[in-house]
Image (cartoon, rainbow, N blue to C red):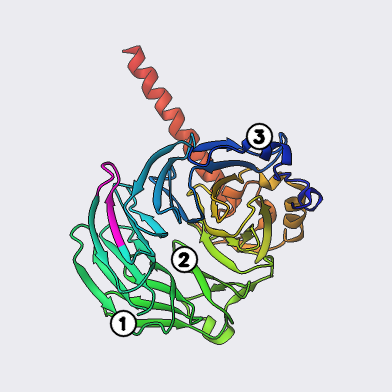
């Protein structure tokens, strides 16, 4: 058990007494808040899977959670209540991954049974399936919901499918020389980014049908996952070598100066990563059972979270940057509330130490000091843009009140 003194301000460890009270029949599902009364980081734990959980994703605009497990099922959960909405059974072996469409009307799943399934979420029926030559290690639905990409072991092939019909559009061979560990669409859905046990990251352009970018030579072990910021300015890669690297792909600066290496925070292999939409925050999960929240602008660790009792397999972060999601071999899904972490003494100390750090405003493009930032959601806007936004909101509210009053007078 982790020593509370190491993370005293957060106080997130569950006591043995609580653990004993939570022992129950593994066939039931449950959602419980498990944190100390005064904890700054509140944690909800979802239970229901009977084996290791390999993937977890926020979906339907963060109102639902989709998980895939070695218990051969995919499950859909309600974010607000933690209740299980539906359990999807169709795989005959471990489910490697489940990826939702943006509106969550459909999702794709793949597994060790060599199958890729596309499901109708509401009916729970499989719309179409495809059998691969080897284990299907990963899959991903495009942001517009029109395409699905899948990657298989043994042959190291990548396939791109029509989401609706199941028609094979592209069959990509000889891109990697070893097992593909993750596959993702770029935010414009014009490229597929893959990571592999061959220690490389590849960008495959769907229009030109060519490998346009190869990232090699920096990681010294398996690259397990990657994540793009929404503007595609930053690509994060994580590896079994315990390193977290940030690549400036659009400008090609990595060719001359290499990627930015975030200081070592994990003691075990890093399994997964996820950027916030604006690219200011990165969360990483590790086989050392910890999550780390990174301040990307300043290249420093902001927060380290512990609570899982086995390897963390996947992580995600909500659109509003208030919630983290993680799943583990310990058969649980954890939802972490990080909106109040800026009040933790250690985080305040770190913030003061970088107070003179200048960053560029996302709205006007002018530089401003991080010392001006009071809330995490303000970290991308200077004080003037924030004030202008508040004034505009206030004027809009006043205008609406005047209109309502005019109608009332009539």
> Mark 1, residues whose alpha carbon is within 10 Å: few (<14), some, or many (≥20)?
few
Residue 251, above or below 360: below
Residue 159, above or below 83: below
Residue 132, above or below 397: below
Q: Please give left or right for residue 271 compared with residue 67 in the image.
A: right
Q: Please give left or right for residue 248 compared with residue 162 in the image.
A: right
As helix, strand or loop, the secondary structure at mark 2 comes to strand
Q: Is residue 193 magenta?
A: no
Q: Nearer the viewer, residue 27 or 135?
A: 27
Q: Is residue 123 magenta?
A: yes
Q: Which mark is residue 173?
A: 1
Residue 173: % across, % down:
31, 82
Residue 25: % across, % down:
54, 38
**Disc count in the image?**
3
Residue 404: % across, % down:
37, 21
Q: Please give left or right for residue 344 compared with residue 206 in the image.
A: right
CB within 8 Å, label 2 to label 3: no
Q: Does residue 150 show up?
A: yes
Residue at the spot 40% in from the left edge and 27% down from the top edge: 400
Q: Earlier in the sequence, mark 2 or mark 3?
A: 3
Residue at the spot 70% in from the left edge and 39% down from the top edge: 39
Q: Earlier in the sequence, mark 1 or mark 2?
A: 1
> Which segment did they paint magenta?
116-125
Q: What residue is disc 3 on?
A: 21
Q: What residue is disc 2 on?
A: 228
Give the image quarter of residue 99: bottom left
Q: Earlier in the sequence, mark 3 or mark 1?
A: 3
User: Of the residues tagged 1 and 2, which is closer to the observer?
Assistant: 1
Give the image quarter of residue 203: bottom left
As helix, strand or loop, the secondary structure at mark 1 comes to loop
Residue at the spot 56% in from the left edge and 61% down from the top edge: 366
């Amino acid at each position: 058990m982790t020593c509370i003194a190491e993370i005293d301000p957060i106080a997130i460890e569950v006591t043995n007494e609580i653990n004993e009270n939570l022992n129950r029949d593994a066939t039931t599902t449950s959602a419980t808040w498990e944190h100390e009364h005064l904890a700054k980081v509140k944690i909800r734990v979802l239970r229901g899977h009977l084996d290791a959980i390999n993937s977890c994703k926020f979906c339907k605009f963060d109102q639902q959670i989709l998980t895939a497990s070695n218990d051969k099922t995919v499950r859909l959960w309600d974010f607000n209540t933690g209740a299980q909405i539906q359990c999807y059974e169709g795989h005959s072996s471990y489910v490697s991954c489940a990826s939702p469409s943006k509106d969550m009307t459909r999702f794709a799943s793949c597994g060790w049974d060599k199958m890729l399934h596309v499901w109708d979420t509401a009916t729970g029926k499989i719309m179409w399936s495809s059998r691969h030559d080897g284990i299907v290690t990963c899959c991903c639905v495009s942001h517009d919901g029109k395409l699905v990409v899948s990657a298989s072991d043994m042959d190291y092939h990548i396939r791109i499918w029509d989401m609706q019909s199941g028609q094979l559009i592209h069959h990509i061979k000889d891109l990697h020389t070893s097992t593909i560990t993750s596959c993702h669409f770029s935010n414009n859905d014009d490229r597929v980014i893959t990571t592999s046990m061959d220690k490389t990251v590849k960008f495959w352009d769907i229009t030109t049908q060519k490998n346009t970018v190869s990232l090699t030579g920096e990681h010294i072990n398996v690259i397990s996952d990657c994540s793009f910021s929404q503007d595609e300015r930053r690509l994060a890669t994580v590896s079994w070598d315990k390193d977290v690297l940030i690549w400036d792909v659009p400008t090609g600066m990595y060719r001359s100066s290499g990627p930015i290496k975030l200081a070592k925070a994990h003691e075990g292999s890093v399994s997964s990563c996820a950027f916030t939409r604006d690219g200011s925050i990165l969360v990483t999960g590790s086989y050392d059972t910890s999550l780390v929240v990174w301040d990307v602008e300043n290249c420093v660790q902001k927060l380290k979270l512990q609570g899982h009792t086995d390897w963390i397999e996947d992580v995600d972060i909500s659109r509003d940057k208030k919630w983290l999601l993680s799943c583990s071999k310990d058969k649980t899904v954890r939802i972490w509330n990080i909106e109040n972490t800026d009040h933790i003494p250690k985080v305040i100390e770190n913030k003061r130490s970088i107070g003179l750090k200048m960053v560029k405003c996302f709205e006007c493009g002018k530089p401003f000091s991080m010392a001006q930032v009071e809330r995490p959601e303000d970290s991308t806007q200077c004080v003037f843009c924030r004030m202008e936004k508040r004034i505009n909101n206030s004027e809009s509210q006043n205008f609406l009140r005047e209109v309502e009053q005019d109608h009332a007078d009539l």
